[in-house]
Image (cartoon, helix red, strand yellow):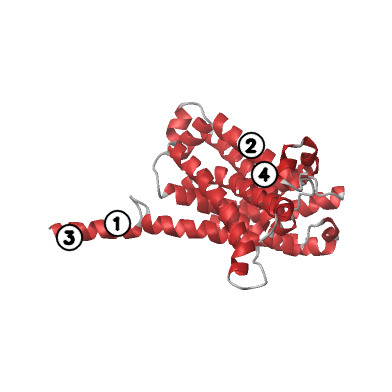
């Protein structure tokens, strides 16, 4: 097991990044799940890649602001292409989305290989699987160092970015909770109240795009979809109240981030294997495992519980 210095330098920042990445995606993901637009989370995790590579090609840097702007432009291009395929090619929406998402992601991978971005810690492997294991905090060497301000001057950039994005997601959900809730559950009422469903939907997509970009470096484009869907879907099995669902999804996201990293880093060692597992992949596995447990054992909607209640009803009759 690692010592204090190794934990503070290697494990703690990676756990914090995993937790924040999961939170940043899960918070807006609640409304994707409720609107039955979970595929949009998958879409954003794919279409942002060419935007990110384009931003790097133009600026020569992987700074957060150019990455976010590139991702938003890529999302707008994807929307335009989907509309064009529907109008010109006569494709139904699902087929048009599938063509555009896969084509843009494949183009992003090819461009990434040819761009030389690997020198900036942006390559195909990291685009697919993330780089949680590469998150290092070179400041504190002991627990006491966490009380010293100078230790925080060396915080990893992606940790700072994810903290800011997660805070922004919380603020936006707090400010526009009513608008998001009304347009999600009763679009007709939203129209009567003068709330534009289209504008709220576009705002939600912008939130999803920003979250996808912020989580991109940590967990990669493939795993982001699990963070958008699994924690909110798990929470949805346990409650019918929206506010409660959001808080539960945040809890499950944090558990998936921290628990997934711990399982990847330490479970193989405890079982006698010298090699750890991919951390981002285990975060997704942990999120999926909680979703499966909720589907089976949730007090009201769980399959096992419902079967038991039905059996009790049959026996009683």
Q: Distance between the residues labelled 3 and 4?
A: 51 Å
Q: Say which element carries label 3.
A: helix
Point out the tag, 1 or 2, that comes first from the N-terminus.
Answer: 2
Which quadrant holds the C terminus?
Answer: bottom left
Relative side of 22 to 133, left or right: left
Residue 297, image x and y in percent?
37, 56
Q: Mark 4 points at which residue?
A: 210
Per the rendering, the mark at residue 314 is 3
Q: Are marks 4 and 2 in contact (CB under 8 Å)?
A: no
State whether residue 179 is above or below residue 312.
above
Q: Say which element carries label 4.
A: helix
- Rendered image quadrant of residue 98: bottom right
Residue 116, image x and y in percent?
86, 61
The residue at the point 76 percent across, 52 percent down is 136
- Residue with the most extreme left position: 317
Q: Distance between the residues labelled 1 and 2?
A: 38 Å
Q: Mark 1 points at which residue?
A: 306
Q: Label 2 crowding class (10 Å Cα cut-off): few <14, some 14-19, many 20+?
A: some
């Amino acid at each position: 097991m690692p010592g204090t210095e190794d934990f503070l330098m290697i494990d703690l920042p990676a756990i914090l990044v995993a937790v924040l990445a999961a939170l940043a995606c899960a918070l807006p993901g609640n409304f994707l799940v409720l609107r039955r637009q979970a595929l949009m989370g998958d879409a954003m995790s794919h279409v942002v890649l060419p935007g990110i590579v384009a931003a790097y090609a133009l600026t020569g840097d992987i700074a957060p602001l150019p990455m976010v702007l590139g991702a938003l432009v890529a999302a707008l291009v994807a929307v335009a292409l989907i509309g064009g395929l529907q109008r010109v090619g006569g494709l139904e929406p699902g087929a048009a989305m599938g063509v555009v998402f896969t084509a843009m992601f494949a183009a992003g991978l090819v461009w990434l290989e040819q761009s030389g971005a690997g020198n900036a810690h942006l390559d195909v492997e990291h685009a697919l699987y993330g780089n949680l294991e590469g998150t290092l905090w070179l400041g504190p060497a002991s627990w006491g160092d966490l009380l010293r301000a100078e230790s925080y001057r060396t915080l990893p950039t992606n940790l700072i970015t994810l903290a800011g994005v997660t805070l922004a997601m919380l603020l936006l959900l707090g400010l526009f909770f009513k608008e998001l809730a009304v347009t999600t559950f009763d679009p007709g009422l939203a129209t009567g109240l003068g709330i534009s469903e289209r504008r709220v939907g576009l705002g939600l997509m912008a939130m999803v795009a920003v979250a996808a970009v912020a989580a991109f470096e940590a967990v990669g484009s493939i795993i982001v979809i699990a963070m958008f869907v699994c924690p909110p879907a798990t929470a949805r099995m346990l409650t019918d109240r929206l506010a409660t669902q959001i808080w539960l999804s945040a809890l499950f996201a944090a558990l998936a981030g921290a628990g997934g990293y711990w399982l990847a880093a330490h479970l193989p060692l405890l079982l006698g294997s010298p090699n750890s597992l991919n951390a981002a992949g285990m975060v997704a596995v942990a999120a999926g495992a909680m979703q499966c447990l909720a589907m089976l054992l949730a007090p009201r909607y769980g399959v096992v519980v419902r079967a038991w209640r039905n059996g009790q009803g049959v026996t009683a009759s």
